[in-house]
Each structure stands twice: as C-alpha cells, then as structure tokens.
Image (cartoon, grey):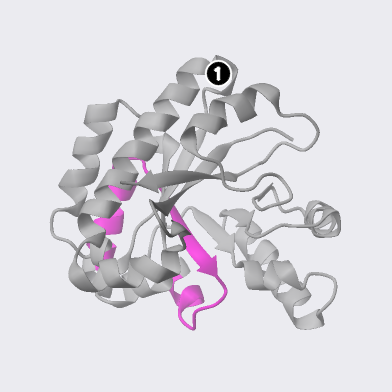
Amino acid sequence: LRPIGFEALIRWRHPTRGIVPPLSFIPIAEETGLILPIGLWTLRQACRDLLSWQRDFPDLETLGVSVNLSARQFGHPGILSQIETILEETGVRPNDLKLELTESCVLAAPENAQTILARLEALDITLCMDDFGTGYASLSYLHRFPFDVLKIDRSFIRNLGVEKESTEIVRSILFLAQRLDKVVIAEGVETEAQLAWLRKAGCPYAQGYLFAKPLPPEKVAEYLAGTSGFVPLLSAVESNGR
C-alpha cells in the first residue's frame, strides 16, 4: 500500500474549549455566510501544504488532496474564478486537486450545478461524489454529472460482513462503478476485516482510522517520512482554523 492523497478537514482549536468539532460550528458558518471565507482559506491552505509535501517527497509527486465544498460555497457565483485563482497562486496541478460534493450541493440548483461541474471538469479537477449511496438521487446523477470518483459512505463500510444489506450495497456500488468506469474510495475503514473484504471485492482505494487518524499539517511530512506497516491510501489532514 502507498499513499495517494489526503483529505483536508477543518478543525477549530479554541483557546479555552480545546478542539471544537465541525458539527458545532460549520452549520453556524453556513447560516451566517462565514463558510465562504473559511472554505477559501481551507482550499488555499490545503493546496499550499500539498505542494510542500510533493517537493519534500518527489517519489510521491502524484500525491493529491481532497477538499469538501459546502452547498453554499458551490452555489457562490464566484466559485470558479476563486478555484482558478488559488490554483494559479499555489502552482498546484489541477488534476492533483479533488473536490468533494454531496448530493445536497447539486440538488439545490441542478442546472447551475451541471454548468459548474462541466467547467471544473474542463480544468482537469477531479470531482468526487461524497457519501455515495445515502441519497435518493445518487444513481440518477451518475449519467448527468461528470463525477470521476464515488466515495462509499462510512455507514455501509461500518457493517461490512455483518449486515447483509450494507454488504450487498457495497458490492453493488463496486460493480456499478466498474461498469461505468468510475473510481471508488471506501470511507471509514477501521478494521483489518473491513480492509480484507474490500481488497477481495476489488475496491482500489480506502481511507479511515485503520491507516491514520487526522494529522495537523506540520505532522504530515514526519508521517510520510516515517510510516511503516499500513500506509494510508487516503488519509486526512487537519486544517487548524484561526
């Protein structure tokens, strides 16, 4: 196994409350509009960090980074120019950037979403459908929108080999993705048994606590230099909110 990338996660390190979980502040940021500057900061910082890691580890030059876009960010009229500007500023190759969107992002305005996704695809940015399998319209969007990657939701991975329904859903997603020439990433892999099942079923990529827990950016270089045993196919990086 070798690392192919990281997912950038925002965490707020409060001076008195410690680490504030995203569910405690992201909904408020969405409601107030603060998610827009927070999202831009996260995207820019993730790209800067990625470029640094690629330079420090030339043998991992194809290392990529995934960044989640909220519905409000995705619907912002300046989102395309903002992404292009960040890529130009940081020098990150577009195909090393993966943007993750949930079904709710495209449900808000499907026609507008189609235009934006087509533009992002033209830039050679990798598009990921996050939490795949949990929404009622996921399948209908596969032929309508140019998603390259399907991320199987952790709720299905958690019950792999234990619950028949979850196991068969994962098996079906893998079969469907292969037929449609989509890449699959399994989220939330935490046990050796889950990884063994996924490998046997032909799932090419995985992420989760089995490989690594979220790391602050300054620890990633140390991690990449000294990892032994299981290496994360897709791990997670914390971006410390300031």
- The residue under the point 34% across, 58% down is 69
- The residue under the point 27% across, 77% down is 108
Residue 126 belongs to magenta span? yes
Q: Residues within 10 Å of mark 1 (few under 14, many from 20)?
A: some
Q: Quadrant of the N terminus?
A: top right
Q: Is residue 100 left or right of residue 192?
A: left
Residue 24 appears at what percent x and percent y? 40, 70
Residue 120, compared with residue 177, is above or below; it is: above
Residue 161 appears at what percent x and percent y? 85, 71
Residue ID for mark 1: 57
Q: Is residue 121 left or right of residue 169?
A: left
Local SS, label 1: loop
Q: Nearer the viewer, residue 220 or 107?
A: 220
Residue 169, compared with residue 41, is above or below; it is: below
**Residues in magenta?**
113-141
- The residue under the point 56% across, 41% down is 215
Residue placed furthest toward the front: 16
Which of the 4 image quadrants contains residue 141?
bottom left
